[in-house]
Image: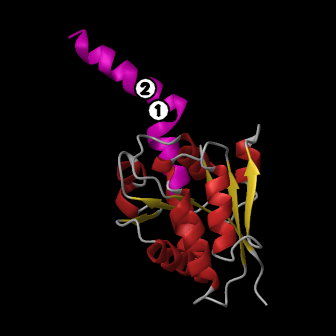
Amino acid sequence: ESPTLNIGIAGRLVRVKRVDIFIQAAQHVKEPYQDIQANFHIFGDGPLKSELESLSFDLGADSYVHFHGHTGNLPEELTKLDMILLTSDHEGLPMVLLESMVCKIPVIAHAVGGIPKLLDHGECGILIDSDVPADYAVAIHELAQSKDLCSRLTGRAAARIQEKYSATSNAMAYLDHYRASCH
């Protein structure tokens, strides 16, 4: 029997984060992909909490979808995950995505806002072009079946953070900009 995967989402429980898609994707993983054992973890709190708990219960997902509420140490919680989903309708540059990439946690994310650029258009994580829960389930299954794919994506993601988003790379970019403006 394969080990149980821990799949997470983190953010405020508000409409734009589309945690409903995360819960429905969990159900889509459990039904057709019975070769995958998984628990789904929701980190965050907000006005939709009771509505999302009801959705989980109504779908029969409440035994494997777990609500953890707000956590004071999200990076520590992230390290316990095997993959993370970002299902938002809109995003800029989500901190949880940067943290996940640094921690080498495979990412499956909706291709909106700054996410495609951050994930190097799919080189550093799986991008989903729809808001269809089954599409996220397919990506979860793909990652669960391929340690090589996980390693390739997370290695590229960690390198990209170091190269493009670290304090050092940002400082050097500013320095280059200032030098160019002095001539």
Nearer to the camera, 110 or 125:
110
* Relative to 87, 99 lies left or right: right
Residue occupied by mark 1: 169
Residue occupied by mark 2: 172
Name the residue rendered at 55%, 71% in the picture: 24
x then y, percent, for residue 112:
36, 52
Magenta stretch, residue numbers:
157-183
- Mark 2–mark 1 Cα distance, whole angstroms, equals 5 Å
The amino acid at mark 2 is: Met
Within 10 angstroms of label 2, few (less than 14), some, or many (20 or more) residues?
A: few
x then y, percent, for residue 6:
72, 67
Q: Quadrant of the C terminus?
A: top left
- Residue 23 falls inside the magenta stretch: no
Name the residue rendered at 61%, 87% in the picture: 31
* Relative to 72, 12 lies left or right: left
**Color scheme of the displayed model:** secondary structure
Question: What is the tally of numbered marks visible in this picture?
Answer: 2
Could you tell me if the residues under marks 2 and 1 are in contact, i.e. CB atoms within 8 Å? Answer: yes
Q: Is residue 18 above or below residue 5?
A: above
Looking at this view, name the residue that lies furthest to the left: 183
- Residue 176 falls inside the magenta stretch: yes
> In which image quadrant can residue 33 be found?
bottom right
Q: Secondary structure at mark 1?
A: helix
x then y, percent, for residue 22:
56, 64
